[in-house]
Image (cartoon, rainbow, N blue to C red):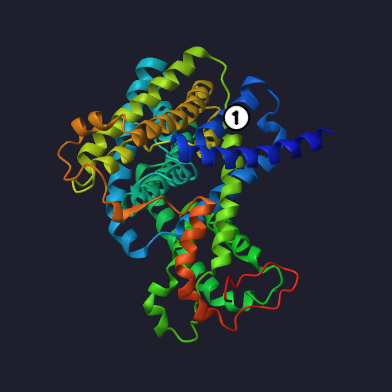
């Protein structure tokens, strides 16, 4: 009976996710917010379900959601635009991360009584933006493609920095045998080697796609392979998220990698219309369940610490406001700079790190975990509310005052993109590219009588 109820609940969540997505079109309230609130009601409020009920399956699910969301995100990134956005994203990410950590350390020492190292741990967790939260939030906002690309890259950079530095400070707090130079070297190596793994895997897989498409039910092979790429990078202690993002980037832009034509026997092909729409629908499903899981994972045992978490959330947003004022190009529209300044939600990576702190026995671990969980919930809710207000135009005067020296107030309509990260938008995006793939796909579709067709219309 309990399993039947669980299945019914999952089905209802998916239907509600569709309803919330439609509601966004009418009200401009991000569908992320009601999904998280739904999770909070299921978990901390009414105690219908606890994260521990899922055991290891819950951790595997959240990792799988991260992998597929980042992979699909990479598929839709434009390589040329990414090259232009990388340095601005790196600059914004590094400055935001460092300033957030530094100011959080001071706040943690003054208001929570934590030591410098423990304050650094909390600061690194609070500075780790979450790509699986940022990407769906960007899905239907009126952002230019340049701004969207920059935010995706920046959130990925900040999450990796947050994970690596938090683990390093935990070692410092418990073992005192790590040096700053070693930590910096590991961070750089984590990025570079993960990108190389993702790039190599993307080239290899695009070369194998013609063969793979003769396998029955082959549409599941690419998601399986991206999981292998992610896991391989993590096993070598590199960044799995970066590897998954780069893998998707290579598959989505394989036609633009002209140097591969000079490599003997390198016959690469891109993904089909049906494959891209399948991945987008998979992202929609995982995203919907992911945010409910985020909500039910929250834990609150102290009103005082919950208040401190809210204070820290507001503090990080104020820090971000100042950083964006000086670290972004003035050629961005006021709307885009406003969106960048509020897009700092935290996610389950921060929750996992907070749990690791408790397991490690660091001084003040309970305080760190409670505050971190509060920051996750409040940041998602606050960012969702602020994006709603921004879409409604209620914050125009405020941001015009802050960023009044921007060259334009609103983004160019020709550059607007509502993001291919909802399943409907992905279908529209993929259909534009379908005609480019048709000539390449002739003769490459396998028999697969029992599996879904991947040829698309006209295949």
Residue at (46%, 31%) from the top-left corner? 173
Quarter assignment of residue 50: top right
Crowd tier of the residue under label 1, counting other residues whose Cα lies within 10 Å: few below 14, some 14–19, many 20 or above: many
Quarter of the picture containing the N terminus is: top right
**188 sits left or right of 300 in the view:** left
Quarter of the picture containing the C terminus is: bottom right
Residue at (38%, 73%) from the top-left corner? 256
Residue with the most extreme right position: 1
Residue with the most extreme bottom position: 264
Quarter assignment of residue 261: bottom left
Residue 337 can be seen in this image: yes
Instruction: Give the residue at mark 1.
Output: 38
Residue 360 can be seen in this image: no
Residue 327 in percent (x, y) is at 23, 42
SS at badge 1: helix
Residue 338 in percent (x, y) is at 29, 37
Residue 286 in percent (x, y) is at 60, 47
Residue at (55%, 71%) from the top-left corner? 205
């Amino acid at each position: 009976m309990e399993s039947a109820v669980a299945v019914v609940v999952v089905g209802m969540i998916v239907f509600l996710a569709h309803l919330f997505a439609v509601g966004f079109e009418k009200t401009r309230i991000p569908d992320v917010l009601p999904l998280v609130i739904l999770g909070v009601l299921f978990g901390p409020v009414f105690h219908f379900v606890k994260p521990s009920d899922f055991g290891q399956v819950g951790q595997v699910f959240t990792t799988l959601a991260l992998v597929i969301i980042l992979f699909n995100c990479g598929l839709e990134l434009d390589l040329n635009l990414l090259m232009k956005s990388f340095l601005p994203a790196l600059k914004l990410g590094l400055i935001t991360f460092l300033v957030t950590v530094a100011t959080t350390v001071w706040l943690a020492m003054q208001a929570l009584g934590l030591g410098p190292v423990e304050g650094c741990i909390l600061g690194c967790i609070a500075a780790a933006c979450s790509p699986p939260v940022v990407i769906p939030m960007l899905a239907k906002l009126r952002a230019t493609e340049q701004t969207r690309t920059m935010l995706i890259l920046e959130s990925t950079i900040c999450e990796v920095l947050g994970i690596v530095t938090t683990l390093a400070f935990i070692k410092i707090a418990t073992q005192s045998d790590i040096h700053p130079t070693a930590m910096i070297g590991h961070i750089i190596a984590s990025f570079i080697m993960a990108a190389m793994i993702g790039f190599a895997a993307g080239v290899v897989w695009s070369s194998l796609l013609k063969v793979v498409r003769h396998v029955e039910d082959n549409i599941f092979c690419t998601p399986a392979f991206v999981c292998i790429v992610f896991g391989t990078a993590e096993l070598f202690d590199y960044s799995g998220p970066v590897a998954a993002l780069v893998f998707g980037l290579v598959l989505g832009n394989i036609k633009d990698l002209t140097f591969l034509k000079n490599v003997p026997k390198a016959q690469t092909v891109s993904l089909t219309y049906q494959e891209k729409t399948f991945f987008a629908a998979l992202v929609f499903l995982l995203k919907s369940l992911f945010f409910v899981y985020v909500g039910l994972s929250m834990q609150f045992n102290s009103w005082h610490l919950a208040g401190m978490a809210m204070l820290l959330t507001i503090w990080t947003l104020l820090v971000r406001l100042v950083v964006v004022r000086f670290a972004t190009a003035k050629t961005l529209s006021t709307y885009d700079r406003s969106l960048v300044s509020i897009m700092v939600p935290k996610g389950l990576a921060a929750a996992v790190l907070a749990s690791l702190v408790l397991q490690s026995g660091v001084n003040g671990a309970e305080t760190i975990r409670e505050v971190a969980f509060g920051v996750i919930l409040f940041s998602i809710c606050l960012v969702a509310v602020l994006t709603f207000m921004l879409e409604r135009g209620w914050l125009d005067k405020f941001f015009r005052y802050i960023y009044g020296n921007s060259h334009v107030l609103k983004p160019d309509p020709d550059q607007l993109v509502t993001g291919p990260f909802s399943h409907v938008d992905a279908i529209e995006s993929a259909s534009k590219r379908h005609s480019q793939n048709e000539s390449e796909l002739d003769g490459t579709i396998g028999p697969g009588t029992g599996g879904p067709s991947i040829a698309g219309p006209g295949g």
